[in-house]
Image (cartoon, helix red, strand yellow):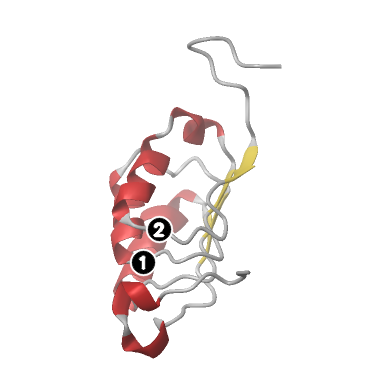
Amino acid sequence: FPARPGRLPSYRTRRWCRWCRSRSRRVQRPVASAPVVAQLKTLDLSNGTLGDEGAAALLEGQPLTHLDTLDLHHHFLSEAMEERVRSALEPHGVHVDLSERNEPWDNRGAEGRYTAVSE
C-alpha cells in the first residue's frame, strides 16, 4: 500500500545503502536526517565505502541511540572514528558492527575505496 501524504510506512528493519559506492558526507547526511530512520531498529550501511566523513555526518544527524544494531562492516574508518562511533552509541545499548576495516586500494585515498561485492 502506498503511504499517505505526510505519513511514512511503518518500518522496523530496513537495509539502506548496502554495497553503496558513494558513502560521502553528501550521501550520509540525507540518511542521517531521513524521518524513517527514527522507526528503524537496524540500520545497515555495510559492504560499501564508508569513510570518516560519512560516519561524521551520521553522528551529526538525528540521534541513532534508539537502534538495536548499526551495521557498518566493510568500511574505511580510521581507528579514531571507530572509537567515536562506538562511544556515541554503545553506551545506549546499540550493537555496532565495525568489523572488516579496509585500506584504500593502491594508497589512492577516497578514490581507492571499494565495495565488498561488485560486478
Whether 80 is drawn above or below 93: the answer is below
Q: Which mark is residue 23?
A: 2
Q: Residue furthest front?
A: 119
Q: Amino acid at mark 1?
A: Gly
Q: Report the Cα–Cα distance between label 1 and label 2.
A: 7 Å
Tell me whether the residue at label 1 lies in contact with that at label 2, contact meaning CB atoms closer than 8 angstroms: yes
Residue 63 appears in view: no
Q: Position of residue 42 (x, y in %)?
A: 59, 46
Residue closer to the observer: 54 or 38: 54
Q: Residue at x 29, y 56 (%)?
A: 56
Where on the picture, by quarter, is residue 78?
Answer: bottom left
Identify the residue at horizontal 46%, vertical 57% (top origin): 90
Picture quadrant where residue 77 is located: bottom left
Outermost residue toward the bottom in this view: 106
Q: Which residue is mark 1?
A: 51
Query: How crowded is the residue under tag 1: few (<14 C-alpha within 10 Å), some, or many (20+)?
Result: many
The picture places residue 99, in percent across and down from the top left corner, at: 54, 74
* Count of numbered circles in the view: 2
Q: Amino acid at mark 2?
A: Arg
Q: Which mark is residue 15?
A: none
Vertical relation: 117 (above or below) 11: below
Could you tell which of marks 1 and 2 lies nearer the N-terminus? 2
Number of other residues with Cα within 10 Å of mark 2, as a class: few under 14, some 14 to 19, many 20 or more:
many
